[in-house]
Amino acid sequence: MSRRMTIALVMFALLGVPLAGQADVPGAAPLRLWHSYRGAERDALEKVVADFGRSHPEWPVELLAVPYEAFANKLTSAIPRGNGPDVFIAAHERLGDWFESGLIAHLPGEDPVWQAFFPSTVSAVTWKGSPRGFPLAFKSLALFVRDDLLEGPVPADTDALLATCRAMGARRPGTFCAAWEAGSFYHHAPWVFGFGGKILDDDGTPRLDRPENAASIAFVRDMTNDGLIPQEPTAALVTQLFNEGRVAMVINGPWFLGELAPGVRYSVHPLPRVSATGLAATPFLTVDAAMVSARSTQPEAAIALARFLAVEGATARLADARQVVALSSAFDAPDTVVDPTVLQFRDAAAAAIPMPNAPVMRAVWEPASQALRAALRGAVEPEAALKSADQRIKIATRPRPPAANPLPALVGLVVIGIAALIWAARRFRRDDTWSKMRASSHAYVFLAPAAIATAVLVFVPFAVGTGVAFFSHYQGEFTYVGLSNFINILGSTDYAVTDPLSFWFTLAVTVMWTVVNVFLHVSIGLALALALRRPWMKLRGVYRVLLIVPWAVPNYITALIWKGMFHKQFGAVNGLLSWMGLEPVSWFSHFWTSFAANVATNTWLGFPFMMVVTLGALQSIPAELEEAAEIDGATAIQRFFSITLPLLKPALLPAVILGGVWTFNMFNIIFLVSGGEPDGATEILITEAYRWAFSRQEQYGYAAAYATLIFLFLLAWSLAAGRLQRRTT
Amino acid sequence: MNRRPAWLAAIGWNLALVAACAVTLYPVLWVLKMALTPSQAFDLSPSPFPTTFSLSNFSDLVTSTDMAGHWLFGHWLFNSVVIAGATTLLSLALATTAAYAFSRFVFPGRKIGMTLFLVTQMFPGVVMAIPLYLLLDAMNLLDSMTGLTLVYATTAIPFCVWMMKGYFDTIPKDLEEAAVMDGAGRWTMFFRIILPLARPAIVVTALFSFMTAWNEFILAATFLSDETAFTLPVALQRYVGDYSTEWGHFAAGAILVSTPVMALFFALQRHLIGGLTAGGVKG
């Protein structure tokens, strides 16, 4: 025991030591620069920062690469608390939002430097008339051509594209002439503009239902139906086909360069014109910008750094990281050798349309992509799909509920609080609780550490989080709105109850999801644990370790592998089906098959945990009992149901109850495997809450109300289950 | 009674388990394949067996350094091990004591206490992240291992308490009654009788707490703002970008992250067997 204590003490001593580099030296606080660059881009950035350090030794810089997935969240938590960076590099899309939320500093508008960048990049970072960040580099989609596969010239318009495709498809079965991530609205947008369509009205209101937009979708749908482009094309599939030489042309962005197999001969071109309109298919332009935090303590130095990255750093970024830099003069620098691909990208982006940086744009992507996929798989006509997307966008961007007076709620809360206190005090006295508590003080000693830790770190944040449910969030400001979030959700005022996005529909799906998963987890886990317990099983140590692999490997990657296995044309599951002579299934086109794909993935991930728990629980059953029953002539099934299972229950039940709770909130699998397809029908409550918080205009209050309802539902369920447990034991 | 089954049954069981392992490992083979292929593309080919063999993805990850020349992988591994180890010890220490109280004592607040622990698992993470950030910031624990360890441990404790309590309930009380006769105190009983008997449950909860801390990245990435303070999963998640993911690096990292878990389980699993009948009761 003393050895154990020593280890614990050493551990805590280690924890108490402040982390290296964290010590504050007054007066010499370095400028903090956050980014999410990787590989060559990261190396080039480090080089530029080192250059900055040489020319400005008085301003040391500290770099931090934050995972993209946590980037926005970290910024919005850290900057208002004064923990954020001085300068950060991010795509310009959210600039409007961040500026309105008070995260981004004002920049000097009179600076002649703005003339030095490509005008479209400056307009991308402009919000309310002034540039709000220094443009570093820009990205847009272009046409990648495999020079060894394309027969004839690079198509200049869609007629030429279709002619080339038809000619090639007839000659080389199993290959495609072109591929792009057709189900993503970002990748589809060039066709929208090429057909003369629009996304936002002139006053900035999103409206997708236009004949031109429908025509663009019909064009891609017909290409899919004619077998000219692959079905359900994901980013991974597009890369794979191009690398394997099974597609001659791909529409993708500069990031695609990093995924190309060595030795593939390619060139980059502007996208073709749309023959029907004569307009070019014009992609969106995304600009990486260096933005200065509004809370920087050294704004002068921070602006100097951001400016340096954009201007002086342009040459190194262009030469070393092959970034398509925004500084136009960088391409003309005398001793810079510019990669021809970079020039091709620069020319392909010449006409690109800056992605709108208005917050409303972020509410468009999800419904627009859903509509696109529904129309591409032929479930609905493009016009109808776009109409329902408009409906969903309208709901996501609907006006916030009116501010309410918090006074009645506060008074009510105080009254209820006092009443509860009085009631508790009376019970306390009546039952003589105090003396009972004193008599069992030892129990509280055992309990206190865990109880205090959980109270502080779980209940306090939860109380704060739940409080948000009574507010409405808009651009960094919270307004008290009373119960209207709850009324809205429970009353299904946005969606009809039968709509896949209504709370009640999603709740039903979530309950079904939980029941099916828990049943499969427990039964498979139990069966394997029983099999592995057999004393004559020679290899059980090996089996056991192999069977927990799904639990050990991070599920972010395995979930996506499962998604790949369910691909309609190229997935292993359909491969197996056709080997058995069955028709391939389009897994994510129908509710039940999509649901089944989610369940299969989650079962694979979840059974090892139940197996381990059961292995532990099985040890509480004396082997003598089973042996006695065996001698008495009980069959294996009788033994299982009348001895093993009842004895397992006390140790297994907590895992089953908690497993149910976790599955109810299992975000990753739904998000990564089906992504809610078809049409949001396979979403569960937690993924819906996430979408309200992050892809529908940051309605944190509404998302918190969802979360509170999830909590209340689970609480009710567990109370019922607890009653059941007491009845049966 | 003859404990040796017919050889037919033995073959049947083994075949079933081999099949289960095959289904289990099939998707993981792609992870291995992507890790061993120098390309950064996601692999959708029908065969999960690697055709090339290159350790470049692993070496990129393991040899990465920051501008000041710190050996980052070493820092990340150390941080992960310390944080996951401390989380395991802390949650075990707090959970076993609490579970013991729930299992063996009758006291006011027992039922509601158990329920409250269960209730914590129902709080969806979406509402917790920002308040937790504010709380840790106020406690000055934002950029520290202590802060993360406390958060992870409190996340893991409720399950551990329920699991341990369930297992403690199956341990006969006669043993403790006998010990009381011999004059043993409560703590002696707890350390000398209950804990050794509950070894299987301790293994399960230890593995669970370890995993809670070992694979988490969202909170770690949000709370930590120093590259040398990151944990392995945060570093790993950086290969996932806005437009594209470096799958080769990610897969190599996934393998590196999961190997210690497997090793830990392999080391601990002998304690899953044995337990009551083999050890304690007779001794």
Image (spheres, rainbow, N blue to C red):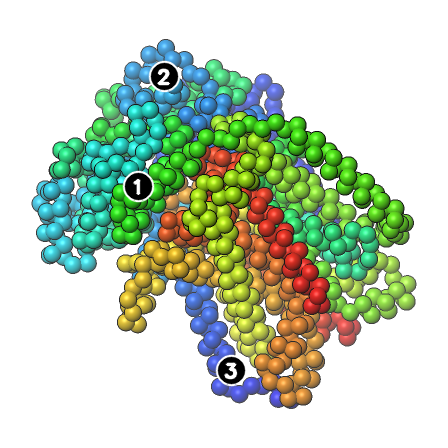
Quadrant into which the N terminus of chain A falls: bottom right
Check disc 1 and give the amino acid type.
Leu
**Mark 3: secondary structure:** helix
Labelled pair 1, 3 in contact (Cβ < 8 Å): no
The residue at 46%/68% (across/down) is B21
Residue bearing the label numbered 1: A386
Looking at marks 2 and 1 on the same chain, the residue that comes earlier in the sequence is marked by 2
Labels 1, 3: front one: 1
Question: Disc 2 and disc 3: Cα gap in Å?
Answer: 77 Å
**Mark 1: secondary structure:** helix
The residue at 13%/37% (across/down) is A276
Labelled pair 2, 1 in contact (Cβ < 8 Å): no
Residue bearing the label numbered 2: A129
Q: Is residue B37 left or right of residue A620?
A: left
**Residue A670, relative to residue A201: is it above or below?**
below
Q: Is residue A256 left or right of residue A51?
A: left
Residue B10 is tagged as 3
**Mark 3 Cα within 10 Å, few/some/many (few <14, many 20+)?**
some
Check disc 2 and give the amino acid type.
Gly
Residue B81 is tagged as none
The residue at 55%/27% (across/down) is A403
**Mark 2 Cα within 10 Å, few/some/many (few <14, many 20+)?**
few
The residue at 65%/78% (across/down) is A642
**Mark 2: secondary structure:** loop
Quadrant into which the C terminus of chain A falls: bottom right
**Mark 1 Cα within 10 Å, few/some/many (few <14, many 20+)?**
many
